[in-house]
Amino acid sequence: MRFLENGPWIPDALLTARDAGRVVFFCGAGVSRERAGLPDFLGLAKTVIEKLGASAGSPARRLLNAAQGIDECVGVEGLISADRVFGLLEREFLTCDIESEVAKALQPPHDVDLSAHRILLDLATTPEDKVRLATTNFDRLFDACHDGLQTWKAPRLPDLSRHDEMDGIVYLHGRTNSDYRASEDGGFVLSSAQFGRAYLAEGWATRFFKEIIARHVVVFVGYGADDPPVHYLLEALNQQEGQASEIYAFQSGAPDEAAAKWRHKGVEAIAYLEENGRHNALWNTLAAWAERANAPDKWCQSIIEHAGKGPANLQPHERSQVAHVISTPGGAEKFSNSEPPPPAEWLCVFDPARRYAKPGHMDIFSENPLFVDPFQLYKLDSDVAPNKISPDDHDTKREIPKDAWDAFAANPSDRQNLKNENFPAFRGYGSVHIPRLPSRLTRMSDWLANVADQPAAVWWAAHQDGLHPDVQSWISHTLQHRKKDVSPVIRQAWGYLFEVWKKKPDGDLGWYELQEATKKDGWDNRAIRKYAALHRPCLKVESFLSEPKPPEGKEEIRFQELVSLKVGYPKPHHRMNIPDEWLVSAIRGLRKNLEHALLLETELAGLHGHDYELRHISPIVLDDKPNIDDHQRTHELSGSVLSFASLFERLMELDIASARREFAAWPVEDDTIFARLR
């Protein structure tokens, strides 16, 4: 998510890892440069060369000038690294003199701005109040932020096999003394030779970093991809088996450019925009992140309260903040317990099928229907923008990206805390009941039940193939016992949806199984029951007639604005040859199906205000209306009526007495289906 509209996008995995105390922040020269004004590595080399009085022909001076010239000429930094400059200086000057000038160059003014360092200390402080921060800087600005912080310097570094020992600031390359006149014991890691000892020959820095990434997530702040510390840390590691994992680096520039600089090093770049040489987008984001780290519950509650405005009234990055909150069990619980609960329209953000729904017109029968693109109302800042669809384009479909965020799909945190009840069972209770939802999704079902009385909730549900039985039960219970003054239309719509989801047809598999069973075992009562069940009509939801966004929460809502129902009939399959001895039983089952169809069609006619299907049954004899196509005669209600008529004609030829008894059982008050058959 993004903390700020123009800030970097921080992966949820990193945010969650920091909350769990698993992140170690590695801080480079950029941390002390941005607000404290200290020099970077090349700037430090230039100052030291001047202070030492290196001659104009000094190899170190010439290399530094060449490095700066190449950077300006080709626009690529780091082609010549500063450790080589210091390596050449060691040939001309004593190491102690070089380190003394380095220390002096890093001495900050009395009113130095320590805000960047405080921000990172806040981020590096775990929920157990341990500080996990390493720096390759030599200055003491982190120490200046807080008295009493534990510090570590080579060769004595934390033993990461002891969980509690990684606490404090690790000065991986040394530190100046307190008066900024020299290095402390052990010196600085400045030159190529010193880097070689630390990372290769003696290898203590490499061993420490290997132990870090084996146990923690690493975040580089204030480094360039080609800075000497990064080069030595990652290049040495990449010689080992496997690649570095769970390492992030903040990098200025466009996302593709930033990723290209770090990808080959096994690091995921977090890109941000640099403006006029300033890194405000980075530091403002880190400050907001630190604010969240210092008071996570308060931050979470503020996001949930902001969500109360409704998703369409927020910016994409603000919607992503809400998405981040509900992506963890704790955040989902706070979201569901909020009073009042965030509005049901958030379902259109949480469901990628609604974010990427096809644009369309609202209230199409009005004089000037409004054209609405759901993506513009509900998109997240991480969503890939789809192709635009014009109002007169009725054919183009909008695809949902495979990696689009989905609040209702199980995420890594859901999978970490699964229990036996979350898995199906081979036998017993769990073998015939759907497994329970993970805790986060259970909390989301609590929220959905709390907003189930809002039109947007049932409108969204009408676009689903189904909801988990526990979710349905909790919604039903809440509407019946915990919600007052629920619109009868809302309750009615939910009731129909529950019925639709409960009676899912078997589809093609059922027909295949029946065909195979009758081939092997012949026809019997079970086969007849299966045959009749496969022909039985049921209610279906027509979501393609829906508008692109939920109806507004007006006082009077019409049923048709929430759910569009129709009677679903089995699709025609290869005709099954029913033996003569089972024909009466089969016809009896199909007649009951037609009676059921009559009840359903009559019921929906009352909801929709018309009985189109009942009044447009195809004639039994095709010649009556020769312009009726084959599809109309073989599908929907007409198909079921004509299929029954065909079997009944066969029964009349086979056993007229049985046919008369069946005819006598037909409803006499009906003037549609059975009137047509007569």
Image (cartoon, rainbow, N blue to C red):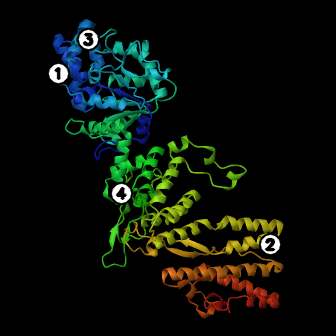
**Residue bearing mark 1:** 110
Kindly identify the amino acid type of the residue bearing the numbered disc 3: Glu
Instruction: Tell me where residue 346 appears, x and y as whole percent.
Output: 40, 57
Residue contact between numbered discs 3 and 1, judged by CB atoms under 8 Å: no
Residue nearer the viewer, 460 or 505: 460
Q: Specify which label sits upstream in the sequence, 2 or 3.
A: 3
Q: Residue 464: tell me if it is visible.
A: no
**Residue bearing mark 4:** 311
Q: Is residue 380 above or below residue 83?
A: below
Instruction: Tell me where residue 464 appears, x and y as whole percent.
Output: 51, 63
Kindly identify the amino acid type of the residue bearing the numbered disc 1: His
Name the element at disc 3. Answer: helix
Q: Is residue 671 above or below residue 403?
A: below
* Label 3 CA crowd tier, 10 Å (few <14, some 14–19, many 20+): many
* In front: label 2 or label 3: 2
Q: Specify which label sits upstream in the sequence, 4 or 3.
A: 3
* In front: label 4 or label 3: 4
Residue contact between numbered discs 4 and 3, judged by CB atoms under 8 Å: no
Give the quadrant of residue 111. Answer: top left
Q: Specify which label sits upstream in the sequence, 3 or 1.
A: 3
**Residue bearing mark 3:** 99
* Label 2 CA crowd tier, 10 Å (few <14, some 14–19, many 20+): few
**Residue bearing mark 2:** 525
- Whole-angstrom CA distance, mark 3 to mark 1, is 22 Å
- Whole-angstrom CA distance, mark 4 to mark 1, is 47 Å
